[in-house]
Image (tube, rainbow, N blue to C red):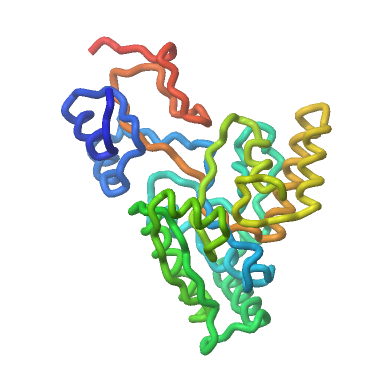
């Protein structure tokens, strides 16, 4: 059945026209639905990462200290637990650690440090890079028009300013999809909302994204070390060798602070209690009709 948007999806489900919703549940309805229909709300964790791409070729973001400060001073848990609160999981790496052959990928050490310590380090880095309260780091977050992206951007901008005691000053800019894509591809942005959804359940679908020659690499990140690590994955003869290469590449990306990874997506949906066979455990959230059945009710 063709449904035009998430709100209509929920309405048709409530009316009994649908047994499973297709769209991700509207964030503003999630808590209410979870309370009213606790056994029918599922949040499948999927192989997808939400991030802010940093324009690595544009000053002052070509300074690693600036990119590092942005990563340190952003509390991902605030975004996942308070802004979105649908089961998203915070991340500090691009490749989901639960993807096939991604099991050796580690979250960077600073992700375990308290925010007070991270904020202090971010302030130090920014001051070393020449910024102060009278000369703050000013930039714009670009995002494609979407209420969720706006909410995340507002929260990020607020945290960056507060956590660095005014050393960062952020503006927001939303663009329609085609214009937004063009802006990213031509490098006309500072930070840009971006995301990647796995084409298949294997870590190379993420690893290839940031190759120097990749057309997807709109962060303008270029690292011979990263490219070499990915090349090693192509030559590996077994899963262990590939996993080691992917972990090496991801560690290089994290050490370069090329992007600001924020969270791994979930796909929250409603499923009637009488629909059997749905587990919400497929990492790509594929729903195969042959696995579903109707329970007599």
Residue at left offset 65%, top offset 57%: 220
Q: Is any atom of residue 134 visible in this view?
A: yes
Where residue 28 appears, x then y in whole percent? 27, 49
Drawn side of residue 192 relative to residue 154, left or right: right
Residue at left offset 48%, top offset 37%: 45
**Quadrant assignment for the N terminus:** top left
Q: Is residue 139 above or below residue 232?
A: below
Can you tell which quarter of the image residue 293 is in? Answer: top left
Count of numbered marks: 0
For the view shown, which residue lies furthest in the bottom direction? 134
**Quadrant assignment for the C terminus:** top left
Q: Is residue 72 above or below residue 137?
A: above
Residue at left offset 28%, top offset 26%: 2
Residue at left offset 23%, top offset 29%: 13
Can you tell which quarter of the image residue 229 is in? Answer: top right
Drawn side of residue 121 relative to residue 26, left or right: right
Where residue 250 appears, x then y in whole percent? 70, 48
Drawn side of residue 4 relative to residue 263, left or right: left
Q: Is any atom of residue 82 visible in this view?
A: no
Can you tell which quarter of the image residue 60 is in? Answer: bottom right
Where residue 151 appears, x then y in whole percent? 37, 58
Q: Is residue 273 above or below residue 62?
A: above
Which residue is more in the foreground, 293 or 50? 50
Where residue 134 appears, x then y in whole percent? 52, 89
């Amino acid at each position: 059945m063709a449904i035009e948007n998430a709100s209509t999806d929920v309405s048709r489900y409530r009316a009994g026209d649908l047994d499973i919703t297709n769209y991700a549940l509207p964030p503003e309805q999630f808590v209410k639905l979870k309370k009213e229909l606790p056994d029918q709300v599922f949040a499948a964790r999927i192989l997808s990462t939400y991030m802010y791409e940093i324009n690595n070729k544009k000053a002052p973001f070509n300074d690693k200290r600036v990119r590092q400060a942005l990563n340190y001073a952003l509390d991902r848990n605030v975004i996942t637990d308070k802004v979105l609160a649908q089961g998203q999981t915070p991340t500090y790496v691009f490749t989901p650690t639960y993807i096939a052959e991604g099991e050796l990928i580690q979250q960077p050490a600073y992700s375990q440090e308290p925010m007070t310590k991270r904020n202090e380090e971010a302030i130090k880095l920014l001051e070393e890079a020449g910024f102060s309260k009278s000369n703050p780091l000013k930039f714009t977050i670009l995002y494609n028009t979407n209420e969720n992206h706006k909410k995340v951007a507002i929260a990020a901008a607020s945290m960056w300013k507060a956590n660095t005691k005014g050393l960062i000053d952020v503006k927001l800019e939303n663009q329609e999809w085609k214009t937004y894509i063009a802006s990213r591809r031509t490098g006309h942005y500072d930070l840009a909302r971006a995301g990647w959804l796995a084409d298949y359940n294997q870590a190379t679908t993420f690893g290839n994204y940031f190759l120097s020659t990749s057309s997807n690499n709109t962060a303008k990140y270029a690292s011979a070390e990263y490219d070499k690590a990915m090349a090693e994955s192509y030559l590996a003869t077994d899963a262990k060798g590939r996993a080691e290469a992917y972990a090496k590449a991801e560690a290089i990306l994290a050490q370069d602070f090329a992007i600001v990874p924020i969270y791994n997506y979930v796909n929250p949906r409603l499923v009637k209690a009488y629909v059997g066979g749905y587990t919400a455990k497929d990492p790509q959230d594929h729903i195969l009709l042959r696995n579903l059945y109707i329970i007599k009710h």
